[in-house]
Structures are given as C-alpha cells and as structure tokens.
Amino acid sequence: MSLYHVQKLLFHLNNVPSVRRRFDAEREALLAEYRLSDEERRAVTHADVGKLHLMGVHPLLLAPFAGRVGLRWPDYLAALRRAREAAGGG
C-alpha cells in the first residue's frame, strides 16, 4: 500500500484544476502517474471513500474529494460509518 501516493493524488485533485480535468477526461492515464496499488486505484476510480478512509487517507483530503465526486455530506459520513462497521470498528 502506498498511502503517501494516494494522499498526494487526492491533494492534487483537490487543488490543481488541470489534474481535476484529467481525472474526468483521462482517469487511467492520470492514475498511472501515481504509484498506487490495484486496490488503491480501484478505490479512487470508484470514489470508494469508505475504503480510502480505512486505508488511512486523511479526512482533510478525503472530504473535499468526496464532495468533488458528488457525494453529499450525510452520504459521505454514512459511507465512513459503514466502512468502520464492516471492518469491525463500530
């Protein structure tokens, strides 16, 4: 797992307009530029915020990413809660 690279990608998605455009237009090519595991790539591609949360992605990076991909705040919180419960963390 390469948490640093996931967080670097999310920082860029949250702060660099050209990276956001590439995420929408050429996602696979963009993701290939970051050293992500297959699991991390799937979680980012599918905006699986629960999985990203369990991987240890910092909330200050994860919350803006969730909003950018269209997840409403209550749904974001519910996804985090479901992920923790599924992992046995209640």
Image (tube, rainbow, N blue to C red):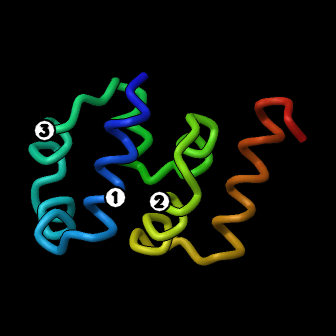
Q: Residue at x 68, y 56 (%)?
A: 79
Displayed quadrant of residue 75: bottom right
Amino acid at dot 2: Leu
* Label 1 close to label 3 by CB (< 8 Å): no
Name the image quarter holding the C terminus: top right
* Cα–Cα span, label 1 and label 3: 14 Å
Q: What residue is disc 3 on?
A: 33
Amino acid at dot 3: Glu
Location of residue 78 in the rendering, given as x and y in whole percent from the top left corner: 74, 61
Q: What residue is disc 2 on?
A: 61
Amino acid at dot 1: Phe
* Label 2 close to label 3 by CB (< 8 Å): no
* Cα–Cα span, label 2 and label 1: 6 Å
Q: Earlier in the sequence, mark 1 or mark 3?
A: 1
On screen, residue 36 above or below 56:
above
In this rendering, position of residue 34 left or right of residue 58: left
Q: Earlier in the sequence, mark 2 or mark 1?
A: 1
- Around disc 1, counting alpha carbons within 10 Å, would you say few (fewer than 14), some (14 to 19), or many (20 or more)? some
Q: Secondary structure at mark 1?
A: helix
Q: Residue at x 10, y 55 (%)?
A: 26
Location of residue 80 in the rendering, given as x and y in whole percent from the top left corner: 70, 53
Q: Earlier in the sequence, mark 2 or mark 3?
A: 3
Q: Which mark is residue 11?
A: 1
In this rendering, position of residue 41 left or right of residue 3: left
- Around disc 2, counting alpha carbons within 10 Å, would you say few (fewer than 14), some (14 to 19), or many (20 or more)? some
Q: Which of pointers 2 and 3 indicates the residue nearer the eye? A: 2
- Around disc 3, counting alpha carbons within 10 Å, would you say few (fewer than 14), some (14 to 19), or many (20 or more)? few
Q: Secondary structure at mark 3?
A: loop
Location of residue 87 in the rendering, given as x and y in whole percent from the top left corner: 77, 31
* Label 2 close to label 1 by CB (< 8 Å): yes
